Structure formats: structure tokens, C-alpha cells
Image (cartoon, rainbow, N blue to C red):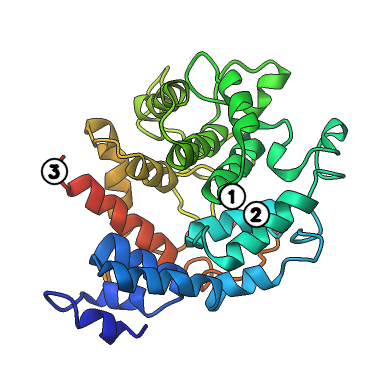
Amino acid sequence: MATNAIERHASKPYSPVIRWLLDSDPSIRWQVMRDLVGAPTGELAAERGRVATQGAGARLLALQGSDGRWGGAAWNRGWNSTMHVLMLLRDMGLDPQSDEARSALGLVRDRVTWQGCGPQECDGNAFFEGEIEPCINGQVAAVGAYFGQDVRGIVDRLLAEQLPDGGWNCAAANGSTRSSFNTTICVLEALLEYERAVGVSPQVAAARLRGQDYLLDRRLCRRKSTGERIEKDRKGGASWTRFAFPTWWHYDVLRGLDYLRRAGVTPDDRLAEAIHLVMSKRDDDGRWPLETRYAGEMPVETDQGEGQSSRWITLRALRVLDWYSTPA
């Protein structure tokens, strides 16, 4: 749908940044219509439906092999595996009820295993049974729940792996007792997606709220013990204050805020520093740049490149700021 056709239904002309966002891929456009424009339901559904048939979403779907896999693997250290493509399709908002999504997910469910992609003891696991690392299992559970697959087994495992401080850490199997922001955000997104899919469970909700508090008590970027700002994570050295899309397994402040927005958390003063950081990155055109791209093979391009204005970052930043500024 052309930008001017959408704008005709608006009570006032759109700002230049909204027009720029609407002049884009259907996967971005429908979310702008939902989260920033308030488009009519019928137009919103029609635009969302185009994710499966046009643009980046359609290109991703076309890359699936007859064996159900993308990139020849359930998971890999690049970004073109089955898990990573499903994460992108979830970010893009591919309608789980669409014929295209049902067909693609049926192939994954029925044909994809973890053979050669994880610990040997998981080789025979079906894709939606997951493997053993909570950061990977969190991502698998998030996409599985979003696309209507049975991931209860993964969720039960994640609940059992929550650490005393409220978060999760892949290194817990090696004796770590402190949680990781990276792992925790992956698990939190999974638990939220699971609750949205099957309804609220007291056990899942309690674990998720403890995990949220882990982030909030650290103001999304500080050590609880000293109050020191964490500029880079220990694993890989990525900066939490530099925004990326896709984020993959990496945490950053904008990803934390966007999760809290989706979870319906009422903003409080623990978020002030993180919100200020987001606001400080907006340029004179009202846009945000893509600050970081993680090394690895992208299945399709989603932005113009590092350092360039990013529609994905701008969309996420604007809806976070709207959430923060809207009275409870």
C-alpha cells in the first residue's frame, strides 16, 4: 500500500519520519501502521498479509529447503540457519495463520532435527524440542510459541534453569551462579511469547517477572553490586549501548526496553537512563542509525548498512518512546 493511501485515513499529515518508515518493506510498514499510526484493522491485516508474499519476508520463505531447513542447519554460528530465519520472520511479524507460515513451520516441525548442530546427545531431537543451552532454547521457544508450535518441554527446562538472582546464563552448566543479560533477554522473550500463545501460567509468569526485575534492578545496563555502567559484555565484547538489528542472541538497551514495552510493564524511574540513551541517538531528521552489525552471513539484507539510518531501529525506538511517555 502506498504511503499516501495510508495517510488519507489519518486525522493529520504524517511527520517526515513516519512517511519514511511507511515507504518501506511490508514487514516494517504494517508495524508502523499498528504501533505508530493506528490504521484501521482491515488495512492493517491486509498489509501484514503482504509479509509472506512481498519483500524480505517472501525472500526468506523462498530460501527454505525441501528438508525444512534454512542454511542446511537447525542452528549455526552465522545467521542463515533455520532458527535465525525464524527469528527474523517473527521480528517481521509474519502472520502465523497464513498459509505460507503454516507450510514452512510444518516442514520444520516434521523434518528438522538438531543433527550435527548442537551437543551430540541432542542429535535426535526434533527442532522444537530444542537442545541444552538456555540462550539457544530461549530463541527456539520464542519462535515456536509465536508460530503455534508445542514448546512446553523447552519452557519447563528454562523454568528449572532460572538462577537465584532471577536471570539465566548459558555458563551455569559450568558453575556460574550469576546471570547473563544476553541469555536472560532470550529467555524472557520466550516466556512472554509462550504466555501470549497459551495463556498465563502462574509458574511461567512468576519466573518472567523475576527475570524482568533482574533487568530493571540493574537499570538495563548497570552492575547491581557496584552501580557501575556495563559498557561491553564479557562474551564477545559487544556494546550494550550500541543498537543492532537483528540482535540475534545479543542484548542491548533498546532490546531490553522493547521487551518491557511488549510485556506491558509500567515505566518507572529505573528506566530513565535507558530512555535518555535512546533519545540521545536520534538525529536531526528524527531517525536512528544502525550502530552495530554482528559478523555472520545474513540470509537477506534488512537495512542499508552500519552507520546508515535504520528503519528497524527507528521503528523500535519510536514505539519504546511512545510507551514510556503514555500515562498508565
The answer to whether residue 195 is seen in the rendering is: yes
With respect to residue 91, does 128 lie above or below? above
The amino acid type found where label 2 is placed reads His
The reply, left or right, for residue 19 in relation to residue 71 is left
Which residue is denoted by mark 1 in the rendering? 248
**Mark 3 → mark 2, Cα distance in angstroms:** 36 Å
**Mark 2 → mark 1, Cα distance in angstroms:** 7 Å
Nearest the camera: 163 or 254? Answer: 163
Picture quadrant where residue 43 is located: bottom left
Question: Percent from the top left, x then y, of residue 181?
Answer: 51, 33
Asked if the residues shown at circle 1 and circle 3 are in contact, with their CB atoms under 8 angstroms apart, the answer is no
The reply, left or right, for residue 201 in relation to residue 121 is left
Question: Percent from the top left, x then y, of residue 296?
Answer: 69, 58
Q: Residue at x 33, y 66 (%)?
A: 32
Q: Which element carries disc 2, helix, strand or loop?
A: helix
The answer to whether residue 295 is seen in the rendering is: no
Which residue is denoted by mark 3 in the rendering? 327
The amino acid type found where label 1 is placed reads Trp
Q: Residue at x 37, y 23 (%)?
A: 227
Which residue is denoted by mark 2 in the rendering? 84
Nearest the camera: 246 or 6? Answer: 6
Mark 3 or mark 2, which has the lower sequence index?
2
Q: Residue at x 81, y 44 (%)?
A: 117
Q: Which element carries disc 3, helix, strand or loop?
A: loop
**Mark 1 → mark 3, Cα distance in angstroms:** 31 Å
User: How many C-alpha atoms fall within 10 Å of the one at disc 2: few (<14), some, or many (≥20)?
Assistant: many
Nearest the camera: 43 or 4? Answer: 43
Mark 1 or mark 3, which has the lower sequence index?
1
Front label number (2 vs 1) = 2
The amino acid type found where label 3 is placed reads Pro
Mark 2 or mark 1, which has the lower sequence index?
2
Q: Residue at x 88, y 34 (%)?
A: 120
